[in-house]
Image: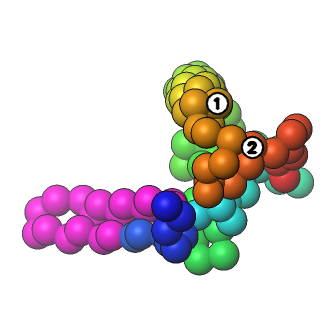
């Protein structure tokens, strides 16, 4: 059963604590991309028609070893997500009402 896509955003504010923003994408309209700004600063972005999320270097400054570790964590998490999605789509019956797995694909 297909459901309507949506993006869910929450903002939690509590006195004495940092703000917490949660973003959940449940949409086939997502795009993921990465690039380098004219300043030389790299960034990674996940976008939808309703929300954009951008990850870049600490304090928008030069790349640090921690930035490299965060980038590795993003790659590892995305690889696990891809593997699980591929496994699950392979298990779907041919006459499933789920969207077909695209061949290839590109990221911005």
Question: From the viewer's perspective, is 33 left or right of 92?
Answer: right
Q: Which mark is residue 101?
A: 2
At 74% from the left edge and 48% from the top edge, which residue is drawn?
A: 100
At 66% from the left edge and 48% from the top edge, which residue is drawn?
A: 95
Q: Residue furthest bottom?
A: 50
Residue on which disc 1 sits: 90
Report x, y in % for residue 63: 67, 33
Q: How many marks?
A: 2
Badge 1 element: helix
Mark 2 closeness class: few <14, some 14–19, many ≥20 residues within 10 Å: few
Boundaries of the magenta span: 10-26
Q: Is residue 21 magenta?
A: yes
Name the one closer to the observer, 64 or 55. Answer: 55
The answer to whether residue 82 is visible is no
Badge 2 element: loop
Mark 1 closeness class: few <14, some 14–19, many ≥20 residues within 10 Å: few
At 23% from the left edge and 68% from the top edge, which residue is drawn?
A: 12
């Amino acid at each position: 059963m297909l459901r309507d896509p949506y993006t869910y955003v929450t903002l939690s504010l509590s006195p004495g604590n940092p703000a917490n923003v949660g973003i959940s994408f449940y949409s086939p309209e997502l795009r993921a991309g990465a690039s380098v700004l004219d300043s030389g600063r790299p960034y990674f972005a996940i976008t939808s028609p309703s929300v954009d999320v951008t990850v870049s270097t600490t304090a928008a400054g030069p790349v640090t070893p921690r930035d490299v570790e965060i980038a590795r964590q993003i790659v590892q998490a995305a690889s696990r997500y891809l593997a699980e999605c591929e496994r699950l789509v392979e298990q779907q019956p041919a006459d499933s009402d789920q969207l077909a797995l695209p061949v290839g694909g590109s990221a911005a």
